[in-house]
């Protein structure tokens, strides 16, 4: 493994472990509630769900079949909270690539090593991607284990398809953070861009579906390519996932070009 | 002699603020070049341009014969940043090893040898290093790969006097090995004992490049002579290079610029019982330079 990738992963290690533990605890606890919920069908019967305001149901991804294994897993894990937490993790790590060290002024010495800026950025990104992949793999195992323990009856293939989407989504947001950080060198700017794009994208994709005036905005929402294919139900939405991957590649290219020509640390 | 650092019309503006303007400078192989100026004068800007951390607005610079944009050349440079930041839970030794690996390795035992000379504890986590220890780690990383060119931005800040001496010894050894050193400072006293030449930068412009030896020769010297009997003031007035003559009875005080020859010959006509000549104060010439420049600027602005 290249020196800088290894070094960056070493720097991310504690954060990675922390976020993995947090995400696993979240998945494990929320998924295990499913079993007790099944014993008390009143709470999530169709009639009970119908009492929720329509907008709230939209925001939670419909909730139409929350009493089924797939519906529950989608609503609690893959709809909102899972991507939200994992995206926060990706944004924090993405900021550690360039913007964080630049603000802390530790980047200057790294830049004066005999490494060109492209390689520096690529290796930092590779460490970010590997770190996120590790978190994704561990959480995939926990999600699979917890859902089979709770008798959810969701095949592994479906969970894998959904989890892959989750990984691609957070890789996109992590790369976005890295890219804004590489272009401007400011953590707050990067977090603001990710926050606004992510939250607005989510709202447009869920509530905006039925509002004609803004529904076209779904095309520029990364969340659209994560949610629209309903991988937990319909399997791999290859096209959507390729869009996420392609957008990530475009961001990475942008980051390389922006970082290459910028004054660092002024 | 070949130029190790060569700049031509090197200019850097931060927006409309001038960082450095029209710097043309040559630093030769095997010399110690002191780069002097007050804070904010453009020293760090110059150094960052040479290391390609920032990019020039115009002009060009080469380092060790290569364009500053060439990353490979940086393996042959040792750099100590002016604002050295070391953070995190990593131990200093591991960080140094990482830097050494990326630069293509250092000879065995070199890091320990330097740590011992500077009395640095490398087992401490970087985020917990004191300011002085951080500076020591910074010096070790700059010197450890025995680079052909050392660029040191305010290297002695935060070091106690004993470590400063050791540092100056390291600089002299590097020069003996034929390496070139560019070190910046805001006080001449820090570099005058080791530098061969000094450049003085002010408000983004290089105002003078001087040989330390020549500077010393031109230095203002305060001289005091005591005679066995009162001497007439007239005998010492109008001597070349002798100013501010004050005679009080049998003692004389004056200031000489450059050589003391004329004064000595004039004094030789009387019986000298005691003579005091202060070591030339380069700081004083340095400040004279500044105030003259300032006067000229003020004049031009009026």
Image (tube, grey):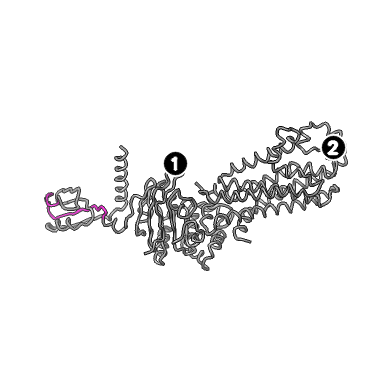
Query: Magenta segment: does it hold A3?
Result: no
With respect to residue A81, does B61 lie above or below? Answer: below
> On the image, numbered disc 2 is attached to which residue?
A44
SS class of the residue under badge 1?
A: loop
The mark lying in front, picked from 2 and 1, is 1
Q: Crowdedness of circle 2 by 10 Å Cα count: few (<14), some, many (20+)?
A: some
Quarter residue A5 falls in: bottom right
Side of A36 where A209 appears, left or right: left
Chain that bears disc 1 = B
Residue farthest to the bottom? B108
Quarter of the figure with the N terminus of chain B: bottom left
With respect to residue A1, does A102 lie above or below? Answer: above
Q: Position of residue A146 (x, y in %)?
A: 81, 49
Q: Which mark is residue A212?
A: none
Side of B117 where A229 appears, left or right: right
State the CA–CA distance, disc 2 to disc 1. 64 Å
Q: Position of residue A78 (x, y in %)?
A: 76, 44
Q: Crowdedness of circle 1 by 10 Å Cα count: few (<14), some, many (20+)?
A: few
Q: Which residues are magenta?
A: B218-236
Check chain identity for marks 2 and 1: say if they share one: no
Q: Write the residue at 83% across / 43% down.
A: A34
> On the image, numbered disc 1 is attached to which residue?
B16
């Amino acid at each position: 493994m290249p020196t800088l990738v290894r070094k960056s992963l070493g720097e991310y290690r504690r954060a990675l472990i922390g976020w993995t533990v947090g995400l696993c605890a979240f998945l494990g606890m929320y998924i295990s509630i499913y079993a007790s919920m099944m014993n008390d069908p009143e709470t999530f019967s169709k009639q009970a769900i119908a009492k929720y305001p329509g907008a709230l149901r939209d925001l939670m991804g419909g909730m139409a079949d929350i009493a089924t294994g797939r519906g529950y897993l989608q609503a609690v894990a893959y709809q909102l909270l899972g991507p939200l937490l994992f995206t926060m993790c990706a944004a924090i790590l993405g900021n550690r690539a360039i913007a964080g060290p630049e603000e802390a002024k530790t980047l200057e010495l790294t830049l004066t090593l005999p490494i060109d800026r492209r390689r520096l950025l690529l290796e930092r990104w590779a460490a970010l991607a590997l770190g996120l992949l590790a978190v994704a793999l561990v959480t995939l195992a926990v999600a699979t284990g917890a859902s089979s323990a709770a008798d959810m009856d969701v095949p592994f293939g479906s969970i894998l398809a959904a989890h892959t989407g989750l990984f691609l989504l957070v890789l996109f947001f992590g790369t976005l953070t890295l890219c804004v950080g590489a272009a401007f060198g400011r953590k707050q700017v990067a977090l603001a861009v990710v926050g606004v794009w992510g939250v607005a994208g989510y709202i447009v994709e869920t509530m905006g579906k039925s509002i004609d005036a803004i529904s076209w905005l779904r095309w520029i929402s990364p969340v659209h390519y994560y949610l629209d294919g309903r991988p937990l139900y319909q399997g791999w939405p290859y096209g959507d996932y390729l869009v996420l991957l392609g957008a990530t590649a475009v961001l990475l290219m942008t980051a390389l070009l922006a970082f290459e020509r910028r004054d660092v640390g002024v | 002699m070949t130029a190790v650092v060569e700049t031509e019309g090197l200019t850097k503006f931060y927006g409309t603020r001038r960082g450095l303007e029209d710097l043309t400078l040559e630093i030769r192989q095997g010399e110690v070049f002191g780069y002097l100026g007050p804070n904010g004068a453009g020293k760090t800007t110059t150094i960052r341009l040479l290391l390609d951390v920032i990019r020039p607005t115009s002009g060009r610079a080469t380092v060790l014969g290569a364009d500053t944009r060439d990353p490979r050349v940086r393996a042959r440079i040792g750099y100590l940043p002016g604002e050295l930041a070391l953070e995190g839970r990593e131990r200093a030794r591991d960080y140094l090893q990482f830097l050494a690996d990326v630069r293509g390795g250092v000879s065995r035992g070199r890091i320990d040898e330097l740590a011992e000379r500077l009395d640095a504890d490398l087992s401490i986590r970087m985020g917990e290093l004191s300011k002085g220890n951080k500076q020591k780690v910074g010096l070790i990383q700059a010197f450890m790969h025995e680079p052909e060119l050392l660029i040191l931005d305010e290297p002695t800040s935060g070091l106690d006097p004993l470590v400063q001496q050791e540092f100056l010894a390291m600089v002299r050894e590097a020069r003996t090995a034929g390496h070139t050193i560019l070190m910046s400072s805001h006080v001449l006293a820090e570099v005058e004992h080791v530098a061969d030449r000094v450049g003085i930068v002010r408000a983004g412009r290089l105002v003078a490049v001087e040989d330390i030896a020549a500077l010393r020769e031109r230095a203002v010297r305060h001289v005091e002579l005591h005679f066995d009997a009162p001497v007439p003031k007239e005998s010492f007035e109008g001597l070349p290079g002798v100013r501010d003559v004050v005679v009080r009875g049998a003692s004389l005080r004056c200031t000489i610029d450059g050589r003391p020859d004329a004064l000595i010959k004039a004094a030789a006509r009387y019986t000298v019982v005691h003579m005091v000549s202060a070591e030339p104060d380069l700081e004083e010439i340095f400040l004279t330079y500044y105030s003259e420049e300032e006067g000229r600027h003020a004049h031009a602005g009026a």
